[in-house]
Image (cartoon, helix red, strand yellow):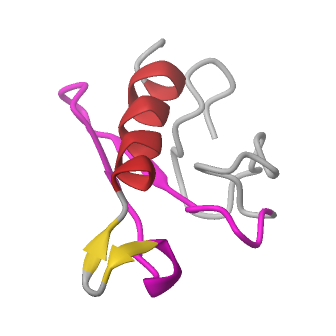
């Protein structure tokens, strides 16, 4: 993980934010978001939308979506 931006560079690198709700790998209730930066500087991300984050059946709660968007903007576009 890039220490300045918090982006994953390669699989297997140290996770600097292990307990973060949005991107931490050590938070059992967290989203475990993964962000990647390509050679052009474009950042993309992904996560598995577990049913425990639903507001209605098959619909992810808006607060969860907002958490992911804010994490991307505030935590990963700073470098």
| Farthest residue, direction front | 56
Q: Position of residue 23 (x, y in %)?
A: 60, 50
Q: Which image quadrant is residue 61 in?
A: bottom left
Q: Which image quadrant is residue 42 in?
A: top left
Q: Nearer the viewer, residue 20 or 17?
A: 20
| Farthest residue, direction top | 78
Q: Position of residue 51 (x, y in %)?
A: 44, 85
Q: Quadrant of the N terminus?
A: top right
Q: Residue at x 69, y 26 (%)?
A: 3
In the image, is residue 47 part of the stretch drawn in magenta? yes
Q: Is residue 45 above or below residue 76?
A: below
Q: Tally the numbered discs.
A: 0
Q: Position of residue 78 (x, y in %)?
A: 47, 12
In the image, is residue 29 part of the stretch drawn in magenta? yes
Q: Position of residue 53 (x, y in %)?
A: 47, 72
**Magenta part of the protein: which range?**
27-53
Q: Is residue 71 left or right of residue 69?
A: right
Q: Residue at x 54, y 25 (%)?
A: 75
Q: Residue at x 51, y 44 (%)?
A: 9
Q: Is residue 60 left or right of residue 48?
A: left
Q: Which image quadrant is residue 37 in?
A: top left
Q: Nearer the viewer, residue 68 or 75?
A: 68
Q: Residue at x 50, y 56 (%)?
A: 33
Q: Is residue 49 left or right of residue 34?
A: left
Q: Nearer the viewer, residue 71 or 66?
A: 66
């Amino acid at each position: 993980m890039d220490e300045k931006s918090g982006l994953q560079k390669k699989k297997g690198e140290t996770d600097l934010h292990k307990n973060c709700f949005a991107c931490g790998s050590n938070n059992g209730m967290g989203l475990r978001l993964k962000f990647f930066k390509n050679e052009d500087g474009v950042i993309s991300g992904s996560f598995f939308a577990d049913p425990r984050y639903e507001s209605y059946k098959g619909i992810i709660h808006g607060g969860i979506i907002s958490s992911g968007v804010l994490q991307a903007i505030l935590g990963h576009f700073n470098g």
